[in-house]
Amino acid sequence: MHGTRIASILSKTEGDTVDAQPSRSPSVAGSTRSTGYPTRPPLRRFLTDCYEEFRTDNSGELADYIPELTRANPGHFGVALVTIDGHVYEVGDSAVPFTIQSVSKAFVFALALETVGEERVAATIGVEPSGEAFNSIRLTNDNRPFNPMVNAGAIACSGLIYGVDGKGAFERVRSKLSQFAGRELGVDEAVHVSETATGNRNRAIAWLLRNYAVLPDDVDAVLDVYFRQCAILVTARDLAVMAATLANRGINPVTGVQVITPHIVARTLSVMTSSGMYDYAGEWTYRVGIPAKSGVGGGIVAALPSQLGLGTFSPLLDNHFNSVRGLKVCEALSARFDLHMLNRNADVRTCIMADYDVYGISSRRSRPPHEQQILDDRHSDIRILELVGALNFGTIDYVTRRLTSEPPNAPLLIIDFRRVPDITSAGAELLGETLTALGNAGITTILSGFEETSAVWAAISARTAEPRRLRRFALLDDAIEWAEDQVIYRFGGFTDVKESTHLGEQALLAELDTDEIAAIVKLSTTRHYSAGQRIIAAGEPANSLFFLQSGMVSVKLRSGVRLASLGPGMEFGEMAILEQGRSADVFADTPVTCLELPLDSFADYRRLHPETSLKIMRNLAAILARRLVLANAKVDLLSAY
Ligand code: GLN
């Protein structure tokens, strides 16, 4: 029925960088014109286009059964959209206050669930669509209101809260709705007085409920809570924030406050979906597919879970008492961006960013040759899975199928979470069960990429029943190193780091004969460092190189990133041969003994012994080439996925 209008909104050309609507910040519009660079997000432009197009529609009527509502300005039209990260888009009269009316029903229902619990609410009010107008005086066969979105159900909700708080009931309602909106909301006294004076139909409903003991004795007091809650003043912006709070699992995305539990949010959105738009609800869900609630003051809230909250205000109503322009905005938004809640898609496979073993890839710990040989032989003993994005039921199911259908012959499985911001409880449940089963099968799983305090780690570890076989490392590299240590330990043991090595084992001095090595030793000085001591500082002039004889050192960038860990028989600071200054820090991880060879005496020696010099330079080239091959393998791995 709104087909043609929506079609014209939908056909607005892409790439148009200038708003039709005069900008609220002229400087932005000005710069847009001068450079052609789009300085406004397309969603803002879309909302502006909607506003421009639908404002000219003057069809519909003001609600007049509450006399005060006829004083509304029929020209008012405001739209606000709040994203899940708390960004607020506003167009038109988004700051004009109006009474919330039936939109309150959704939030008061949530409050009733919170206040008296699900069981009491269910015993009092149904959740079936009534198929009738909001103010119908009809109850279900067992004499309960059909649902909390029609007046009978909403009055029953107010009654439940009144039963707990008595005179404090309205304040509880006002305060809760204020939390949803993120600011203190007030009441339009004139509208309240007006509805109190004329609300005999609601009085009839309330007394009918009293007859069936759905309401307590104080019928008038309960009605006053209901009339007052309907007269709460909001703006389209407020409604958008309130809706976004529902869309964001109960956390107000603007204030960050958890207003209501995710469980209650799901119940509230359910009744909004089935009954939120009065007797238009079925059609609405079919066409728009976004949980919504409207009110006779001209407001509509629409909450699309995990996407957005929309608030619209335009007091001209159609024959279902829904705001004409508001309805059009919702329809256009849903159609233009394909937002129907039942039209979802997701490619679960994108959650695995990389799946590999340590063939050609190793941790940044440089291993002595016999250890490296073990790792080269046993590379498939360590399998690494790097996950990406928020994980949920579908993605983790995919991960667990990958793990179980391709049984990891690897006894060590590393799963990296550094690109995972979140996991749902369903995801953690599925993963925990799989990790438990892998643990029982003797496989050790190492999770990396989060701190001890991480919620993702807490969720997964709490559901894994084989803690002996579950480890955590903050850094993937440390996890790989730990796994490598396990493999080396199983297949040949370690080089004792305290054991001194002969200089002839240094890669830089390979192929040198004993005389040549003796000459190098003569030029060098033995140095001792204690654990934690800095041996080389980035930025200092590079005037010597070191041969590590015992202990371990780590080469680190200023950022703390570890470039390499080295053990006996390895050199460091050797880049001094090529570069003027030190590019990284080197720390002793354990007590360290090394030989320091000053660069100037080394240079003299090389001049006198060009043959030896050639061997050393060739060795240096080989060391650098190996490093490059390793770095390329890592880059290749990441870009292959
Ligand atoms: N206060 C109004 C009433 O009870 C609310 C109705 C509505 O917004 N649909 O009639």
Image (cartoon, helix red, strand yellow):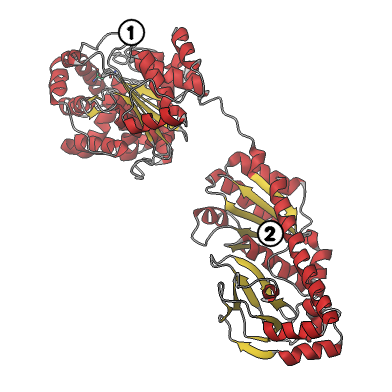
Q: Is residue 411 something that shows in the picture? A: no
Secondary structure state at the residue bearing disc 2: helix
Residue 181 at what x, y percent from top left? 30, 36
The mark that comes first in sequence, 2 or 1, is 1
Residue 278 at what x, y percent from top left? 36, 16
Residue 61 at what x, y percent from top left? 27, 8
Viewer-side residue, 323 vs 271? 323
Residue 616 at what x, y percent from top left? 80, 77
In the image, residue 155 sits, relative to residue 612, either above or below, namely above
Residue to which mark 2 is pinned: 439
In the image, residue 577 sits, relative to residue 422, either above or below, namely below
Q: Quadrant of the C terminus?
A: top right
Secondary structure state at the residue bearing disc 1: loop
Residue to which mark 1 is pinned: 319
In the image, what residue occupies the spot 65% across and 63% down?
477
Q: CA distance from mark 2 to mark 1?
A: 63 Å
Q: Is residue 362 something that shows in the picture? A: yes
Relative placement, left or right, of 354 versus 74 is right
Quadrant of picture, ligand 1: top left
In the image, what residue occupies the spot 65% across and 51% down?
386
What amino acid is found at the position of numbered circle 2 in the picture? Gly
What amino acid is found at the position of numbered circle 1 in the picture? Asn
Asked whether disc 2 touches disc 1, contact meaning CB atoms under 8 Å apart, the reply is: no
